[in-house]
């Protein structure tokens, strides 16, 4: 089990990581998601031992790696690393790159290399040099090299960002399967929301060096703790509301919140997939289509409500609609946030 307790790291006047804590148990995958400059790569370097924290502790299975005057260097932490630029040795063959970190008899090293080449489906490239293979193949070699010494943990720093979209998705699925097969816990640092959601069992959302939210990908997406989290992890419509006689009024209807919600909401948040588009005479809230954006597997439809506010709706690609068409909107789900942008203690309510 990896434990980070109140880690902080400052560069000059910039506090890159502030009071950061997280736990990774068993063979789980943890993604650290956040915008550029939020401190996520610094956090990974603190875990790896490539940086010294100013304060806080890192422990692995109860053993202190950082903290209380102790520092275990990166080469003795038994962690594997996969970098954004692959970092293969250009003067070594594929097999030699994989064998680099393996100790023991030559026969045992060769056996392990063969196992890993089979695992990453590259046995036919063992004698090739890094410049002779594709970017996706180089990334698989980098993964095999990180797995070679049988590490206790794999750390991945934006490993797919240099690849084109289709290859990135394919390789992400392949590497996810390989790591699950090996049973190695993994931390992935990324700024890609879909990557974090699809790759991990647990997510940590960072901004400005601090922890914003942690949980499963479904929890972070469906119950974002703040308006910032909601808009960073996926698309979201934000609509103002006003309080009148115990009810919230919005351009999508009237919301009745449970009595345990002690604070009136200031914002109604609706994911585009929680709105349905129907014919103008089918009830619901009326609006006019302003824009239709075809996205292949779906359509993003922009609708202006009678109030003047504009919402985005995700619909199947076969949905027939055109700009200036009158439509009705039906609401399937929403969240309510307070004046400070925080998720209300009980976001569930009824829409009238």
Image (tube, helix red, strand yellow):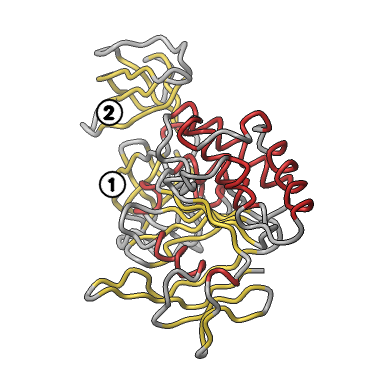
Using the image as rendered, state which of residue 174 and residue 326 is in the foreground.
Answer: 174
Q: Which residue position is annotated with label 1?
A: 240
Using the image as rendered, state which of residue 328 and residue 98 is in the foreground.
Answer: 98
Using the image as rendered, state which of residue 239 and residue 114 is in the foreground.
Answer: 114
Q: Which residue position is annotated with label 2?
A: 305
Measure how far apart labels 1 and 2 are at the Cα level. Answer: 13 Å
Q: Is residue 290 left or right of residue 38?
A: left
Disc 1 element = strand
Q: In the image, what residue occupies the spot 59% across and 46% down?
A: 143
**Could you say where residue 49 lies in the image, as x and y percent from the top left?**
49, 71
- Say if 129 sits above or below 242 in the image: above
Q: In the image, what residue occupies the spot 24% across and 34% down?
A: 309
Quarter of the image for the C terminus: give it: top left
Q: Residues within 10 Å of mark 2 (few under 14, many from 20)?
A: many
**Could you say where residue 147 lies in the image, as x and y percent from the top left?**
65, 52
**Could you say where residue 200 lies in the image, as x and y percent from the top left?**
58, 48
Disc 2 element = strand
In this view, the residue farthest toward the bottom is 69
- Say if 26 sits above or below 129 in the image: below
Q: In the image, what residue occupies the spot 52% across and 80% down?
A: 66
Q: In the image, what residue occupies the spot 78% across and 53% down?
A: 108
Q: Residues within 10 Å of mark 1 (few under 14, many from 20)?
A: some
Q: Which of marks 2 and 1 precedes in the sequence?
A: 1
**Image quadrant assignment for residue 25:** bottom right
**Could you say where residue 317 lies in the image, as x and y percent from the top left?**
45, 15
């Amino acid at each position: 089990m990896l434990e980070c307790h109140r880690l902080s790291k400052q560069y000059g006047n910039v506090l890159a990581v502030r009071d950061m804590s997280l736990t990774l148990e068993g063979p789980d995958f943890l993604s650290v998601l956040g915008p550029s400059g939020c401190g996520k790569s610094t956090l990974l370097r603190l875990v790896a031992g490539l940086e010294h924290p100013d304060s806080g502790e890192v422990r692995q299975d109860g053993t202190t790696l950082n903290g209380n005057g102790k520092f275990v260097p990166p080469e003795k932490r038994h962690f594997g690393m996969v970098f954004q630029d692959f970092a293969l040795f250009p003067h070594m063959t594929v097999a030699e790159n994989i064998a680099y970190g393996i100790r023991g008899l030559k026969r045992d090293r060769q056996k392990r290399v063969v196992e890993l080449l089979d695992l990453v489906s590259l046995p036919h490239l063992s004698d090739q040099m890094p410049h002779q293979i594709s970017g996706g193949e180089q990334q698989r070699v980098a993964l095999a090299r990180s797995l070679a010494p049988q590490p206790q943990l794999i750390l991945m720093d934006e490993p797919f960002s240099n690849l084109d979209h289709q290859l990135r998705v394919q390789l992400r699925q392949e590497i996810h399967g390989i790591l699950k097969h090996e049973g190695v816990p993994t931390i992935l640092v990324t700024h890609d929301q879909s990557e974090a959601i699809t790759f991990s069992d647990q997510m940590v959302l960072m901004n400005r060096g601090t922890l914003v939210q942690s949980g499963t990908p479904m929890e972070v997406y469906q119950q974002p703790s703040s308006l910032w989290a909601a808009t960073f992890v996926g698309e979201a419509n934000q609509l103002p509301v006003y309080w009148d006689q115990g009810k919230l009024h919005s351009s999508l209807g009237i919301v009745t919140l449970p009595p345990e919600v002690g604070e009136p909401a200031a914002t109604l948040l609706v994911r585009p997939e929680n709105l349905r588009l129907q014919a103008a005479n089918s009830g619901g809230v009326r609006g006019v289509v302003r824009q239709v954006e075809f996205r292949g597997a779906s359509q993003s439809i922009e609708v202006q409500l009678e109030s003047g506010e504009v919402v985005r709706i995700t619909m199947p690609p076969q949905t027939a609609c055109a700009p200036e068409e009158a439509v009705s909107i039906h609401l399937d789900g929403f969240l309510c946030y307070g004046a400070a942008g925080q998720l209300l203690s009980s976001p569930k309510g009824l829409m009238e």
